[in-house]
Amino acid sequence: MKRFIKKTLFFPFGLIILYGIIYFCYNTYLNNKFSNQNAVFIWGDSQAYYGIDVKELSNKLEKKVYTSAIPGAGIYDFLLFTEQVPENSEVIVSVSKLVQIRRKENDFNRTGLSFWALKKMYNEDYSINEIYSIIKLNIKPKRNISETSELFAYSDSMEIGLPISHFEDYYREVPTFLEQKQDLYLIGIKNLIRKNCKVSFLELPYHSKLVNIESKSLIKKETDVFKYKIGKLFNNFKMDTISLNNNKNVFKDLSHLNSVGAKDLSNKLGTKMLVDEGTILYTAQ
Amino acid sequence: MLFNSIDFAIFLPIVFVLYWFVVNKNLKLQNLLIVIASYVFYGWWDWRFLSLILFSTIIDYLVGRRLKTENNKKNRLILLWVSILVNLGFLGFFKYYNFFLDNFVSAFSFFGTEINANSLNIILPVGISFYTFQTLSYTIDVYKRRLEPTKDFVAFSAFVSFFPQLVAGPIERATHLLPQFYKKRQFDYYKAVDGMRQILWGLFKKVVIADNCAEFANQIFNNSADYSGSTLVLGALFFTFQIYGDFSGYSDIAIGTSRLFGFDLMQNFNFPYFSRDIAEFWRRWHISLSTWFRDYLYIPLGGSRGGTLMKVRNTFIIFIVSGFWHGANWTFVVWGTLNAIYFLPLLLTKSNRSNLNVVAQGKILPTLKEFALMGITFVLTVFAWIFFRAENINHAFQYIAGIFTHPESFLAISVYWKYKTILVLLSIFMLIEWVGREGQFAIAHLGEKWKPAFRYAAYYLIIIAIFWFGGKEQQFIYFQF
């Protein structure tokens, strides 16, 4: 019996070691593009996933551009991203308001395992259950980086994807977890600063109907304060706007650009990034 | 409580520690602990159904006691029928009431008479078909004087409700399992390690094979009208492996768990998809049910003792009843009948016992003939599973018709490419099963002669595969039977 108990108790140690080795090797293989020192890395949620034409931006900047944007991306994914990008690299972070106010359980949280990120979340009062469910989602390594983007085809008119009521629900009241998420966002940004990354922030546009809802919501004040807090982390922080072409419909739905919008935005963003110095928050309109 | 749940992962070590460290000195207490643990395990689903098990246990215990002292033939028969009626009465009510009612109403409606009868909203108690058959085996064996009735109510309760096999078998015979509750159990290291290995393989079958196949099989069967012939064939194939991985995986976990507690359960699956004919398949698939029907139905009906007509009749009865045991739906009856039809040529040519040994025993590869025979048997089995999985008879026929439309789709690589991961997993799985087919389960002898480090690495790789390739958690299919 002693022998059985001893072996049963020791069995998991070997498993953890082997699992760790395999996980590390496979994860490194899947995400080896993160080792590219002279590239631009993008992070964001679905707005950035569909709203940035990676090829266009890459042509403009004459650099490799990789995107880690993923629909539904959450704060955990952002923390992990900041861990993965190499030091001294150039980073575009999409400051999506929906990332901040999306219900925690709807966050993607599936871009790999990081004890650092989990610890930060635990410190910010994420419950053990929440941490456990994140671990469960990340047991298998996943490719988090790509050099292509998936764009929505152009159409003359916008589709109503999610109904307006969905967004009204989201903006009805200030979520209790907003500050918690914003603090974690700031921790990630600080990590990028520590790594000496050149950070550009990008606020992708919403359709005017959604802007209307947002402007009437109490959340607006909180997200504006948050932008201010981001600015305070940098010595040379500026804000700039990118005006998208109004001749054609640029929206796929209320919160996502179509391919025309994405191309236009990427072109103009690239042009500005080539000349701008310091840390800039670009707001596309 | 599901075997592949966190609840069970906590429950099992607690019961194990209590069993071997706290109550290990007292056999009665050990049995009592098994009863309590089993009731907790079962009550985790729905505590209300515990009363059914308890009632069955009391009735069969009392019937057994009376049979011991009763010598009058007629009275003995009455006692037997009390047990049969109570047990089958529960089963009939919970499982078949609505089915019979609906068919009754439809039959009258066919002849122009409308009957108003409301179906009841009945929840089927998990595993009722399994423990009902297990307790019935006790009463029948006591009646036939093959088994001495027990005085020990706790041991009997433990036999009826033994948690590893309570909800999905193997359906144990009282003659085999009950005496194990009378004997003092000694912890056997090798038995326990073997049990752990079998649990691991069972989990792999369930989580990696069955759950992944289930996702695709459900998708394809539920939208069969939208798919081409090649995808429908894949759908049937996925279900074939889903049901095998699911059910044999459960049996492996059940047998492995029992070994941890010092019990031996009967083998329930013996690599059925390597069978060379349908008779061999039925000697290897759900062995505990097939042998139950053989011993308590087929043989009492006359078995193969009578003339050809009687043999054919008995074969059809056993297969149709077996089909009906699986569920209250005509699809199961057709599935059973189809298997009887497959069996018939073997019976009539007296070749139903021609493949008793393991295929290609001691060899790496089968002969071409063996390979062809396995292929034919497998195709027949896959075809029968379509009826088993279909929602109703119409659906099954539409599904089969769909296979033969757009035959050009069979050449489209893209169809198979879409399912590449699961197809690769299935190939690896079948390869491991083939290599290990001479053992009790596929990895029973895995790495026996290897250095421990390599053997452990193999176990770790299986666990990692469970983590990485595990499908979306699905209920065990056989719970509904």
Image: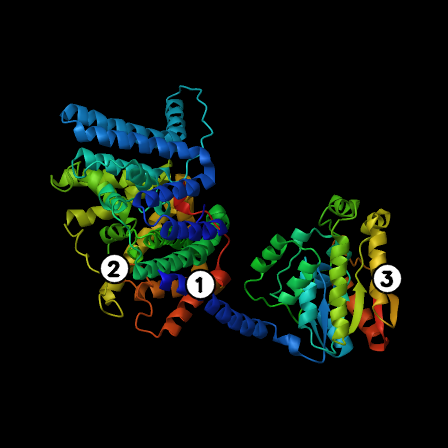
Q: Which mark is residue B292?
A: none
Amino acid type, residue under disc 1 in the picture: Leu
Amino acid type, residue under disc 3 in the picture: Tyr
Mark 1 / mark 3, whichever is N-terminal: 1
Residue with the mark numbered 3 = A228
Chain letter behind tag 1: A
Protein image colouring: rainbow
Question: Is disc 3 on the same chain as disc 1?
Answer: yes
**Label 1, residues with CA under 10 Å away: few <14, some 14-19, many ≥20:** few
Residue with the mark numbered 1 = A9
Residue B430 makes an appearance in the image: yes
> A188 or B100, which lies in front?
A188
User: How far is the residue under mark 1 from the one under mark 3?
Assistant: 51 Å
Q: Is residue B268 left or right of residue B212?
A: left
Check whether the beta carbons of the residues at disc 2 and disc 1 lie within 8 A of each other.
no
> B350 or A16, which lies in front?
A16
Q: Quadrant of the N terminus of chain A?
A: bottom left
Residue with the mark numbered 2 = B373
> Residue B27, how many percent across, how many down?
30, 45
User: Residue at coordinates 32% horizontally, 54% vertically from top-left?
Assistant: B259
User: Residue at coordinates 17% horizontally, 27% vertically from top-left?
Assistant: B70
- Quadrant housing residue A133: bottom right
> Residue A185, how many percent across, how many down?
75, 62
**Label 3, residues with CA under 10 Å away: few <14, some 14-19, many ≥20:** few
Chain letter behind tag 3: A
User: How far is the residue under mark 2 from the one under mark 1?
Assistant: 46 Å
Viewer-nearest of labels 2 and 1?
1
Amino acid type, residue under disc 2 in the picture: Leu
> Residue B194, how many percent across, how many down?
33, 60
> B308 or B84, which lies in front?
B84
- Quadrant housing residue B273: bottom left
